[in-house]
Amino acid sequence: MINKIDIFVVLFLITIISNAQTLSGKVIDAQTQLPLETVSVYFDNTTIGTTTDENGIFSIDYTDAVQSTLVISYLGFEKVFIVEYRSQQNITILLKEAINELDEVVIDADDGMPRALKLKWFRKEFLGKSKYGKSCKILNEKDLKFRYNKRNRTLIAWSNKSIIVKNKSLQYEISFDIIDFEIVIGSFNARSVTYTGTSFYKDLNASGKKRILKNRKDVYDGSIQHFMRALYNKQLEEQGYIFGKDGFKVDPYDFFTIDNINKYGYRIVALKEKLDIYYKNDTESVIQTSVTEFKVDKYGNYTPIPDVLFGGEMGSQRVGDSLPLDYGLKG
């Protein structure tokens, strides 16, 4: 079964030196027109972030390698997402008060599943079942809210606050803002898992311990990002990937059509049909798409993420197996 995972996870390994750019701006309350202090401003799924000062002012640096959305987040206000920030140098952002419709649901009603069991399902499918997922701890579980639909066996989760996850093995503290989270529960395991959100990583490995760096490299190897980089560079087999169809080894380039690099730095990729993927003859995954083509850039970013579906080892990767977008980058 292919799990549809909307994690917006993008990983990098290679070191790239890029010209740094600076984006400055001011965040104000849309209703009062007053500046907002300590607003979080960060690039989604990276370690690159800052907060506004007492005048609502912020300044944040980035390089060409950063392709993710700029997120402006403040408790009690609607988040703002900015994609086209490269053409701007100074911006003013108006934050509107958030209206949380889900909070109007009677949370404590008897819906057929106790909170302890809901938390168990959430931990397993949000953090993951790998050794790295099991090393994670959610520091503010009390902020999680759930609703279970007994008829279709669907569990949804949300929170008005960022979910704070400490990954002991990878030494990251992750602030994850849930946009959507849904588990369709089968007899013993999840039939499907879908979640979206934005995240900010705080690197806790200040001393650069070799054990932690080795763990991070272990997570990267054979990951979706590693695969996408190999796909872009047409180095699938050189990077350790073997492909199969109906039990037989196949040439991946008989199934993938990879266009030349366009003026925007992307390659357009099309996948003819579902393929089995083996990484170094060890782990097994499956890839299929629900679109005729998707885009990949040299850093491994790809879009549309929800329509490129992974099953098996890659499909089971969760927050506990994730690295920030700027992992391995200097610039």
Image (cartoon, grey):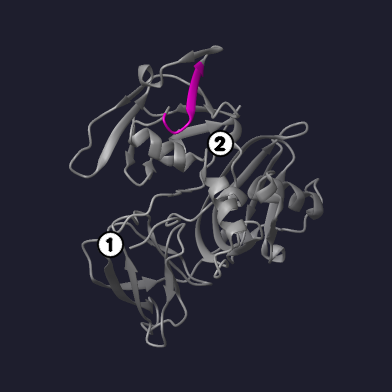
The quadrant in which residue 27 appears is bottom left
- Give the image location of residue 313, x and y in percent: 60, 34
- Give the image location of residue 282, x and y in percent: 60, 29
Please name whichever residue, 244 or 264, is drawn nearer the observer in this view of the structure. Answer: 244
- Please identify the quadrant where the N terminus is shown: top right
Please name whichever residue, 33 or 3, is drawn nearer the observer in this view of the structure. Answer: 3
Quote the CA–CA distance across marks 2 and 1: 31 Å
Does the magenta run of residues contain 239? yes
How many circles with numbers are drawn on the protein? 2
- Give the image location of residue 50, x and y in percent: 43, 74
Determine whether 319 is above or below 284 in the image: below
Please name whichever residue, 161 or 45, is drawn nearer the observer in this view of the structure. Answer: 45
- Residue on which the image places disc 2: 314
Q: Secondary structure at mark 2?
A: helix
Residue 122 appears in the rendering: no
Q: Residue at x 77, y 31 (%)?
A: 187
Amino acid type shown at disc 1: Tyr
- Give the image location of residue 121, x and y in percent: 73, 46
> Mark 2 or mark 1, which has the lower sequence index?
1
Amino acid type shown at disc 2: Met
Determine whether 165 is above or below 322 in the image: below
Disc 2 versus disc 1: nearer the observer: 2
205 on left or right of 43: right
- Residue on which the image places disc 1: 85
152 on left or right of 173: right
Q: Secondary structure at mark 1?
A: loop
Magenta residue span? 238-244
Residue 320 appears in the rendering: yes
The quadrant in which residue 272 appears is top left
